[in-house]
Image (cartoon, rainbow, N blue to C red):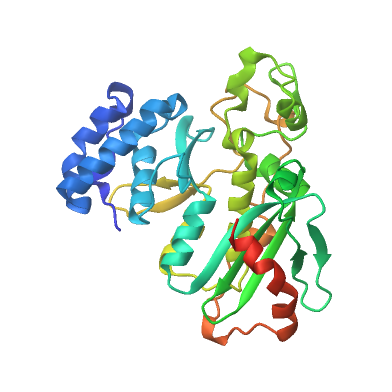
Amino acid sequence: MALTNTLAPKKEENTKLTFSTFCSNKKKSIEEMLGKDGATRFISAIVSAVATTPALADCSHASLLSGALLGESLKLAHSPQLGQYYLVPFKDRKSNTTQAQFILGVKGWKQLAIRSGQYRLINAIPVKEGEYLGLDPLTAEPKIRFITDPDKRDKLPVVGYYAYFELLNGYRRGLYWTKNHALEHADRYSQAFSWHGVNTDKMQKVSYEDYLLGKYPKQDEWKYSSFWYKDFDTMACGKVVKALLSGGDAPLSIEMQQALNADENVIEMGEGEEFHFGTADKADNVSPDIPENIDEDGVVSDTTDETTENEQAPAEKPKKATKAKASPKAEESQEEMSDLFFNN
């Protein structure tokens, strides 16, 4: 879905108009893309989302609308309760503006994969203590044996995250991240999250462990508004699915490739341009829930890579699913856990 500069706001527009008024002024252009009924539903949903999330009200109106339109073009619902995608605010130091960052949730990845018509099963789940059995020596696939007693399982701590897909032709692939790996990823790439805490003259944040224990002043609750704090397991599952799908073995539809390019980026619109993606590096920006004058060296060390090795989209065109075959050993080692995994 191409967007033209009819949606690009005037320079003064953001400071004078509410987001609701901004969307009303763009309604005709949105109707041309989504139809009259579709535009009414879309505007109502996104305005409601912004109204119930105060931090989003500070975001550039164009970045909010662009991110929501991308989600609409992927036929995903913007609702934190559904968890298909999120618009997350951050402070862009380069332009001195607050922008909306597009983040695809685990349920969004599942929707796109199943919709492609090439996946029989796809899922991601937290792994509890005692369930990870190591790597298969022949296939290097993670071996997981899930505990079947739900009461017993609920009481055990999470030690990692497992993502898994199976194609219609029987080809299977799984990926396991330890919880420390997920924590390191969040600490590195999420502007608002700090694994070990922050203690500088300009910002104090407790460690993630202390946050879980409630060892922080209640007046500082705003510092921990990131989804990585509120629902770490769900966010981690989404990132493992992304890493699995972008690893080179998964067939990717056009929608899935578009989502891989857009995830964790700002969807921008310029004069006469279609969608293009701006970066939202932790090293280059400051989260909107952190004061603008914070010393970035007190928050996180500089990074230059935008994605980890596991998360980089394949440079070459993915292999067709019909050419991929699972070895008998791989099928045998995964057979027992398949039903347990996909029933969760």
Q: List x then y, in percent, for residue 103.
A: 50, 46
For this rendering, which residue is in front, 155 or 81?
Answer: 155
In the displayed structure, would residue 15 be above or below residue 302? above
Residue 184 visible: no
102 with respect to 195 (left or right): left
In the rendered structure, the answer to whether residue 318 lies left or right of residue 11 reads right
Q: Position of residue 69 (x, y in %)?
A: 33, 48
Q: Is residue 97 above or below residue 282?
A: above
Pick the quarter of the image with the N terminus.
bottom left
Which residue is at a point 69% across and 63% down the rendered structure image? 175
The quadrant the C terminus occupies is bottom right
What is the total number of numbered labels drawn onto the structure image? Answer: 0
Residue at screen point 31% across, 29% down: 19
Q: Residue at x 17, y 46 (%)?
A: 37
Whole-percent x and y of residue 140? 78, 72
- The front one of 113 and 35 is 113
Horizontal side of 38 relative to 178 (left or right) equals left
- Residue 225 x/y as whole percent: 57, 28
Q: Residue at x 34, y 41 (%)?
A: 65
Q: Quadrant of residue 13?
A: top left
Q: Nearer the viewer, residue 338 or 248?
A: 338
**Res. 208 visible in picture:** yes
